[in-house]
Image (cartoon, grey):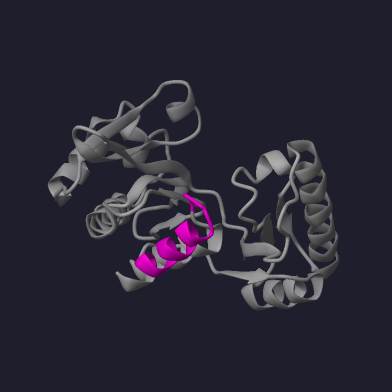
Amino acid sequence: MKLAKKIFETALAEGRTFVLEHEAKNIMKAYGIPIPDYGTAATADEAVKVSAEIGYPVVLKILSKDVLHKSDAGGVKLNLKNEDDVRKAFDEIMENAKKYGVEQGHEVDLSRGVFITQFSDMGTEVIVGVTKDAQFGHAIMAGLGGIFVEVLKDVSFRLIPLTKLDAREMLDELKAAKILEGVRGQKPRDVEALIEVIMLVSKMIEENPEIVELDLNPTFAYEKGKGVLVVDARILIDKPE
């Protein structure tokens, strides 16, 4: 995938071992992984224009090579419902990023402005991730998000590459698998769409082994037949082998 390679080359040339959020979403989109509509804006006026094109409500996030953990820098604003909300959020994010830079002892590059995306309806929260082990290579992880991953560590792993049967077994192995199947009056989640995302991630890693860590978290799984959405994506890279 030439697009991914070009993005990784740009990142490494800038001294980054991570890709920016719009870059990650561009890669997701190129691989056919379902994501909400998105755009970028360097000014408040541009942010208003892009938000209107995407459709309210929207989310704004700082877009800077100097800020990896956006929430820590006060760089995320959710559920913005109109032009005034967007203008206020843009100004606050820029101000928060400047303060964060002072606290960290370095200036934060604000030239890229913000990443803007749709505010997605909540689904069942799922995490799909990849890690690279020095001995075994890349492994893919899947599990339910929230308390299931944070407290119960309810996740399943497979080495890459994997088959659709492997992906299905990963989900079946979860202690919370019945939540995906539908419990207590809840309708089943779209497991087939989730399996497809796992397979696309496997393909992405096969074609781009310089990825050392990947997190699609949260990924929202909706009712059966209504698909999934990867709401947030983080990709860490190393120099090509």
Residue 174 x/y as whole percent? 29, 30
**Quadrant for the N terminus in the image:** bottom left
Viewer-closest of 60 and 114: 114
Q: Is residue 112 left or right of residue 44?
A: left
Name the residue: 42% across, 42% down. 126
Residue 26 x/y as whole percent? 46, 67
Q: Which residues are magenta?
A: 4-18
Name the residue: 31% across, 26% down. 175
Q: How many marks can you see?
A: 0
Residue at the top extreme? 152
Tell me which corner region of the image, top left, top right, bottom left or bottom right, holds residue 171: top left
Vertical order, 4 against 186 (above or below): below
Q: Is residue 79 left or right of residue 14?
A: right
Residue 181 x/y as whole percent? 31, 40
Tell me which corner region of the image, top left, top right, bottom left or bottom right, holds residue 207: bottom left
Residue 67 in view in this figure = yes
Residue 61 x/y as whole percent? 67, 55
Vertical order, 94 against 184 (above or below): below
In the image, is residue 8 part of the stretch drawn in magenta? yes
Viewer-closest of 135 and 148: 135
Decide whether the magenta segment is chiefly helix, strand or loop: helix
Name the residue: 33% across, 66% down. 31
Residue 182 in view in this figure = no
Q: Is residue 106 left or right of residue 95?
A: left
In the image, is residue 67 part of the stretch drawn in magenta? no
Viewer-closest of 117 and 114: 114
